[in-house]
């Protein structure tokens, strides 16, 4: 069997980038059961309600929905169980101290396979206020309009 290379995206949390200011990102491994891996290989997962909590100097991923494997038997996993994250001790200590600060949280951004191993990208984030969300949307819309105007000018110059 040939080794997998590269990054294959399974799920991403676009809402997290809308709801939070991303301060720092980390890539970490996951402790999974066999049926979870098979379900992820089918490209089925949801990070929508997920968050990371640090208990007793261990990082745990909560509320990430990995549906049960369709060909699984009684050994199948539960869809929303908490999963252990594999991080270095220094990274866990840093995340734990930063997440204690007011308004900071740890959210999953993406779930993917990297060279055949399941990885999750987590971020230390600070919640946005409603006006920050509107400002971000306004900037995105302004950038899009500027790009359209520039491409229209380029089209007219070619003609």
Image (cartoon, helix red, strand yellow):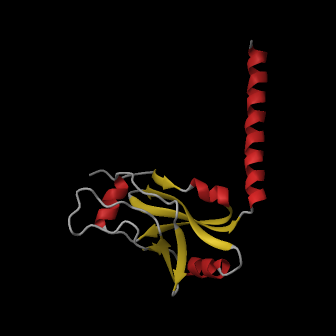
Q: Is residue 120 above or below residue 60?
A: above
**Furthest residue in direction bottom, as rendered:** 56
Percent coordinates x, y for residue 4 in the rendering: 37, 52
Percent coordinates x, y for residue 62 in the rendering: 48, 71
Q: Residue at x 66, y 55 (%)?
A: 18
**Furthest residue in direction top, as rendered:** 159
Q: Residue at x 75, y 23 (%)?
A: 152
Percent coordinates x, y for residue 58 in the rendering: 50, 82
Identify the image quadrant of residue 99. Answer: bottom right
Residue sitting nearer the eye, 56 or 50: 50
Identify the image quadrant of residue 114. Answer: bottom left
Which quadrant holds the C terminus? top right
Residue sitting nearer the eye, 1 or 102: 102
**Position of residue 148 in the picture relative to residue 55 (left or right):** right
**Position of residue 147 in the picture relative to residue 32 (left or right):** right
Q: Is residue 89 above or below residue 104?
A: below
Q: Residue at x 76, y 34 (%)?
A: 145
Q: Tag count in the figure?
A: 0
**Furthest residue in direction left, as rendered:** 73
Identify the image quadrant of residue 33. Answer: bottom left
């Amino acid at each position: 069997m040939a080794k997998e290379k590269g990054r294959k995206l399974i799920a991403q949390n676009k809402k997290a980038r809308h709801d939070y200011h991303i301060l720092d990102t980390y890539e970490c491994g996951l402790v999974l059961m066999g049926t979870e891996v098979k379900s992820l290989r089918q490209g089925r997962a949801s990070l929508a309600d997920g968050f990371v909590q640090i208990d007793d100097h261990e990082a745990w991923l909560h509320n990430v929905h990995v549906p049960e494997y369709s060909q699984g038997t009684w050994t199948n996993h539960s869809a929303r169980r908490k999963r252990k994250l594999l991080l270095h001790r220094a990274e866990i200590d840093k995340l734990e101290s930063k997440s204690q600060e007011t308004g900071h949280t740890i959210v999953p951004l993406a779930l993917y396979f990297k060279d055949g191993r399941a990885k999750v990208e987590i971020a230390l984030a600070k919640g946005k206020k409603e006006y920050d969300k509107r400002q971000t949307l306004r900037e995105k819309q302004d950038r899009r309009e500027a790009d359209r105007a520039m491409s229209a000018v380029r089209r007219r110059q070619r003609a």
